Image (spheres, helix red, strand yellow):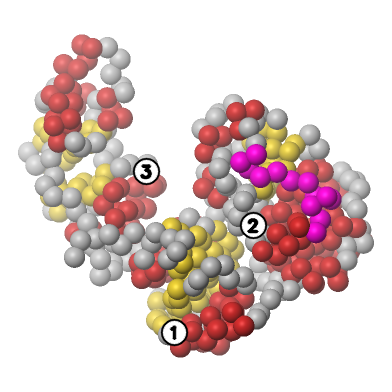
Amino acid sequence: MKIITTHKGTDFDAFASVVAATILYPDAVPVIPRSINPNVRAFLSIHKNIFVTNWVDEIDLQAVEGLVVVDANRWNRLDGLEKISKNDDIEIIVWDHHLDGGNIKSDWECIEDTGAAITLLVRQLKKEKKFLTPIQATLFLMGLYEDTGSLSFPSTKAEDARAAAYLLEQNADLNIVSSFLHQAYGVKQKKILFDMLRSESRVILNGFHVGFGKLFIDGHVASLSIVVRMYREILNVDAAFGIFSNKERSKCIVIGRSNIDDIHMGTIMRSLGGGGHPRAGSALLRSVNPNTVETMIMELIKGNQETSVQISDLMSFPVTTVPQHISMEEAAALLRQKGCTGFPVVDDYKIVGILSRRDFHKIKKPSQFKFPVKAFMSTDVITVSPEKSPMYAARLMVKYDIGRLPVVDKGDVIVIVTRSDAMMYFYDMLPD
């Protein structure tokens, strides 16, 4: 079985791309996440007999042999596909318009800089002379207009305009497009905007004026993105962030809007586990303090420069080190005794390697447990200095896929920062 899917928080561009892909890959099953935008949900409720889709939890993932991903190229943006991500036998195809790099290793891909992902698929549909019904053309135009602001966003390319013209030629209905893309701005939204303005916070970061609005909300509130856009316009700042916390559901919705290219919302939100475009993005976090989220965003804008919270605030004491000449057998016993997952390996107090549980997998026969640690340790050591920020440490851990960072001061290992230490900071669990 081959499936087609897209990112969580499915918008019209993502959904339209899924439907377009079903025309290009007629043997594939369209699968969408449970979390979809309210206007897309409204559209689906009316057109569910025309656009038949499946929820991801309705699919037998063990039967999947092929995967088509649209409007995304990172595994963490997909819903419930962790098992598939570890299966190297699955053929993967990617259609996306985000150029900042992803971690989905595809067998074939079309990734180009356009205002909307649907633009790429429409171009292919036109090339293959596929027939489009008026309602399909209308849906595709909704996706294109939503992501390009009806061709007004700076990210819009000539290719988007050509795709829009082609869809209009295929009888796309602009009245329907307008009705579903029009975002409601009612009493709830007005109150939220008023509360954000009443407690607004403005800072200057790297010479740019940035506004932050933090608010606790009850239940689901639609059209928060339009509230954040208006918030930015009223404050007249270069960028604005709305941080909306829901205590009952233990989640935090972060929405950002920018008026300049220097503050790339897509990049910032991807660092928080979400996504977006140069001037618009969002992320959903769970069990996190809104003040911590604000700090993280400011660090990202400042380029992860030093902040009031430093690595020295996170360090695990005391650090256990091992000399390079002890046996792997002795090191294993020490790991069990200390309950650790790894040690810095030192020679005369200078770090020469790292020994982790992964290194024990290199042992192929019992006699090798008598070998010295230096025969199996990793010598490509990544270290950090105590004055660096937690965000900097976390980025190193992600980049190099490591669970611990030796903290080195003047060449000496003083302590170690673990992945757990970094996560405690990000989720506001530092001790008083």
Q: Name the residue carrying label 1.
A: 200
Instruction: Report the span colored magenta.
Output: 46-58
Q: Earlier in the sequence, mark 2 or mark 1?
A: 2
Q: Position of residue 2 (x, y in %)?
A: 70, 33
**What residue do we see at 16% from left, 16% from top?**
370
Examine the rendered structure and indicate whether residue 124 appears above or below residue 161: above
Q: Position of residue 377 (x, y in %)?
A: 24, 30
Q: Which mark is residue 400?
A: 3
Q: Name the residue carrying label 2.
A: 36
Circles 3 and 1: CB distance less than 8 Å? no
Q: Position of residue 272 (x, y in %)?
A: 45, 59
- Three-letter amino acid code at the position of disc 3: Tyr
Q: Position of residue 135 (x, y in %)?
A: 87, 57
Packing grade of label 1 (10 A; few <14, some 14-19, many >=20) is some
Judge from the rendering whether residue 199 lies leftward or rightward of residue 427; answer left or right.
Answer: right
- Please name which of the two marks, 3 or 1, marks the residue nearer to the observer: 1
Residue 49 is inside the magenta segment: yes
Residue 278 is inside the magenta segment: no
Judge from the rendering whether residue 90 lies leftward or rightward of residue 24; answer left or right.
Answer: left
Secondary structure under badge 1? loop
> Disc 3 and disc 1: Cα gap in Å?
38 Å
- Three-letter amino acid code at the position of disc 2: Ile
Examine the rendered structure and indicate whether residue 335 appears above or below residue 72: above
Secondary structure under badge 2? loop
